[in-house]
């Protein structure tokens, strides 16, 4: 007997009979909510409302991972491929990334612009829901509810701050959107700043100094953001922000309050802010969890986007279905990977995890450091590469052939890139890949960072030992699979080192009442931490003209600040060294009015523009409104000037 066949016939009969019975009682179009659960009654319950506020946090991950708009087109990060420009061989490639070149491709159709806009306004709407629905919550402690409302106001203020810096006059919805309206009216930038400041002042007086849940907004975070908002408004971009000189004093006052609280002391060792990792692959690497155990609890960090505390903040649009989380991808966003010699690809190798990024430090970025005195140079860049597999390579087909083979075992040095101020002048100190070289690994001078010049107008150099720039490895976390983005390193969005530099900037701009002294005192606090106790007080040197490869290495300038020499440019140099890769650079240049001068001077693609004519101009201090928004709004949202 075919039991399955008989069962199937019987099951089909009962299903059809049941459907007919239901259709007689209720229309298929009628909605039925057996639990009688709605957003109104769910979010009015304390548990449901807590969930609503918590849901405002995960989008910070997506927002802060839109790094192309804050790194590219600046003075310290660019796209690769500019060797042809440097060697005056533009036929080798005239085009980099439009965010660097600011050419005709820099327009409203750039996908990164649409992504950031959409994420910011999703966050704003979610925060608006938490703010407006708080009035209906019953049975919740009033103090706790006020704190949760201020968490949402802080996150809304942060999103509006990003938006108004990027686009100027922007939409500013302050109520939850539950309709299908296509209207998106602009609000003047000065009024957006006024609302942000109003919200943050409420946060400062309401939020506690600490919270039991790691990663929630605190009073210190609100003060930090408010200080930066005042600092930005004080510069009063194009007289459009409603700022005055008193804003600089307001910013300084908040910076001094944060410093005086002693809640966020500078780490004694700058490297303790980043995951533990060892250059040599034969050295024992810490586990994924232990590598971030120190940096993720650093007291210097005032507010961080959470990745190691998923129980509190589950992500949206998660790419890891097993865990339902978004991980930090900072480790994979920067070019300049390892040497290709004796390197294994795939998901488990140490060095290969650093590849796959899109942001390359400019030549000037390396030459802003004193590699001998400043610990941040080797903490930011890894200048030595080691073999991860055993391999024998032949130099027979190299342009500079020596008809030999070199064998490597795991852990052997395969390449070294020398600091800009430590040149190798003798052929015998170089690798065997060049005439007269004696080393079994390549040794590159700083001049080689951009690659080799052509031998002839059409013939390049073949060198299978060549390694160009040092690896950017500040954020690398051992144990993270190749390019998957699931790092558990908490992104330190605000930290106290920046507070000192913000205070210095405010003083240079005329702020009064500084508690620690003149602007150089605040600046040198950050610098001396980087130099370490043994070198504190010394005068480190950077290249006088960091953008010029042919400049003599003896042409240097000190970057220790004094009351007489400190300037905004000097502070921007220090923030580049201290905060490199931490996704705020475009905002710093836009705020200080230095985007055009610094990007065109230090970013090779920006300086080149098109056919050697730099195209960055005042219009680029604002980004174009995303075309996707322009197309769907009714009435049509006004595009920014020049686009």
Image (cartoon, rainbow, N blue to C red):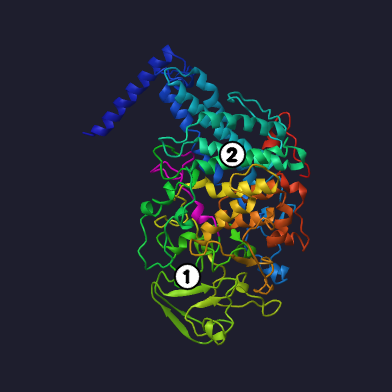
Query: Is residue 450 located in the magenta-colored stretch of the structure?
Result: no
Q: Tell me: residue 417, above or below residue 2.
A: below
Tag 2 secondary structure: helix
Residue sitting at the far left: 1
Tag 1 secondary structure: strand
The 10 Å Cα crowd at callout 2, few under 14, some 14 to 19, many 20 or more, is many
Q: Is the magenta stretch mostly helix, strand or loop?
A: loop
Q: In this view, does 189 lie to the left or right of 386?
A: right
Locate residue 83, reporting x and y percent. Answer: 66, 68
- Of the image marks 1 and 2, the number of the one nearer the N terminus: 2
Give whichever of 574, 339 is nearer the camera. 574
The quadrant of the image that shows the N terminus is: top left
Q: Tell me: residue 286, above or below residue 494.
A: below
Q: Tell me: residue 595, above or below residue 340.
A: above
Q: Is residue 356 visible to the viewer in this orientation of the structure?
A: no
Locate residue 353, reporting x and y percent. Answer: 46, 59
- State the residue at coordinates (52%, 64%): 535
Residue labelled with disc 2: 254
Q: What stretch is highlighted in magenta?
A: 315-334
Q: Of circles 1 and 2, which is in front?
A: 2
Label 1–label 2 contact, CB within 8 A: no
Q: Is residue 113 visible to the viewer in this orientation of the structure?
A: yes
Locate residue 427, reporting x and y percent. Answer: 56, 85
The 10 Å Cα crowd at callout 1, few under 14, some 14 to 19, many 20 or more, is many
The quadrant of the image that shows the C terminus is: top right
Locate residue 216, reporting x and y percent. Answer: 46, 36
Residue labelled with disc 1: 385
- State the residue at coordinates (50%, 22%): 134
Q: Tell me: residue 471, above or below residue 134.
A: below
């Amino acid at each position: 007997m075919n039991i399955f066949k008989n069962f199937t016939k019987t099951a089909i009969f009962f299903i059809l009979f049941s459907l007919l019975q239901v259709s007689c009682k209720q229309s298929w179009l009628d909605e039925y909510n057996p639990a009688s659960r709605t957003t109104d009654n769910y979010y009015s319950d304390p548990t449901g409302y807590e969930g609503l506020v918590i849901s405002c946090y995960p989008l910070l991950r997506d927002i802060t991972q839109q790094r192309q708009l804050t790194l590219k087109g600046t003075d310290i990060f660019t796209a690769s491929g500019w060797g042809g420009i440097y060697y005056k061989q533009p036929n080798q490639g005239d085009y980099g990334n439009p965010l660097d070149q600011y050419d005709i491709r820099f327009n409203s159709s750039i996908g990164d612009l649409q992504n950031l806009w959409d994420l910011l306004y999703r966050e704003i709407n979610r925060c608006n829901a938490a703010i407006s629905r708080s009035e209906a919550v019953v049975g919740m402690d009033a103090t706790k509810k006020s704190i949760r409302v201020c968490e949402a106001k802080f996150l809304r203020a942060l999103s509006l701050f990003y938006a108004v810096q990027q686009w100027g006059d922007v939409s500013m919805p302050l109520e939850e959107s539950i309709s299908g309206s296509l209207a998106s009216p602009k609000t003047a930038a000065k009024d957006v700043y006024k609302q942000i400041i109003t919200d943050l002042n409420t946060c400062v007086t309401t939020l506690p100094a600490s919270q039991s849940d790691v990663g929630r907004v605190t009073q210190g975070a609100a003060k930090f953001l408010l200080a930066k908002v005042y600092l930005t408004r004080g510069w009063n971009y194009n007289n459009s922000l409603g700022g005055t000189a008193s804003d600089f004093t307001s910013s300084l006052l908040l910076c001094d309050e944060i410093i005086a609280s002693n809640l966020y002391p500078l780490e004694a060792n700058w490297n303790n802010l980043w995951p533990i990792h060892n250059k040599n692959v034969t050295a024992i690497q810490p586990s994924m969890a232990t590598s971030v155990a120190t940096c993720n609890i650093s007291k210097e960090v005032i507010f961080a986007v959470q990745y190691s505390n998923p129980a509190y903040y589950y992500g949206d649009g998660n790419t890891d279905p097993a865990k339902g989380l978004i991980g930090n991808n900072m480790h994979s966003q920067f070019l300049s990977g390892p040497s290709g010699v004796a390197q294994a690809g795939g998901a488990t190798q140490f060095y290969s995890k650093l590849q796959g990024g899109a942001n390359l430090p400019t030549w000037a970025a390396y030459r802003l450091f004193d590699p001998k005195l400043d610990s941040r140079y080797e903490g930011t860049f890894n200048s030595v590469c080691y073999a991860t597999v055993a391999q024998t390579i032949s130099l027979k087909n190299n342009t500079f052939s020596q008809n030999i083979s070199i064998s490597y075992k795991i852990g052997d040095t395969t390449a070294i890139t020398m600091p800009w101020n430590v040149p190798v002048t003798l052929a015998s100190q170089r690798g065997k890949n060049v005439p007269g070289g004696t080393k079994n690994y390549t040794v590159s001078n700083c001049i080689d960072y951009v690659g080799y010049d052509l031998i002839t107008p059409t013939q390049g150099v073949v060198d299978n030992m060549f390694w160009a720039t040092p690896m950017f490895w500040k954020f690398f976390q051992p144990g993270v699979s190749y390019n998957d983005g699931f790092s558990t390193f908490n992104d330190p969005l605000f930290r106290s080192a920046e507070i000192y530099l913000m205070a210095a900037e405010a003083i240079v701009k005329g702020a009064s009442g500084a508690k620690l002294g003149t602007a150089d005192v605040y600046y040198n606090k950050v610098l001396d931490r980087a130099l370490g106790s043994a070198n504190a007080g010394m005068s480190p040197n950077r290249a006088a003209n960091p953008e010029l490869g042919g400049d003599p290495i003896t042409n240097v300038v000190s970057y220790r600040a004094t009351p007489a020499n400190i300037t905004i440019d000097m502070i921007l140099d220090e923030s580049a060294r201290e905060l490199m890769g931490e996704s705020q650079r475009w905002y710093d240049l836009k705020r200080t009015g230095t985007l055009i001068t610094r990007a065109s001077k230090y970013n090779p693609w920006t300086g080149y523009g098109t056919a050697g004519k730099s195209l960055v101009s005042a219009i680029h201090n604002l980004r174009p409104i995303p075309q996707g928004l322009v197309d769907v709004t009714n009435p049509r949202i006004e595009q920014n000037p020049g686009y």
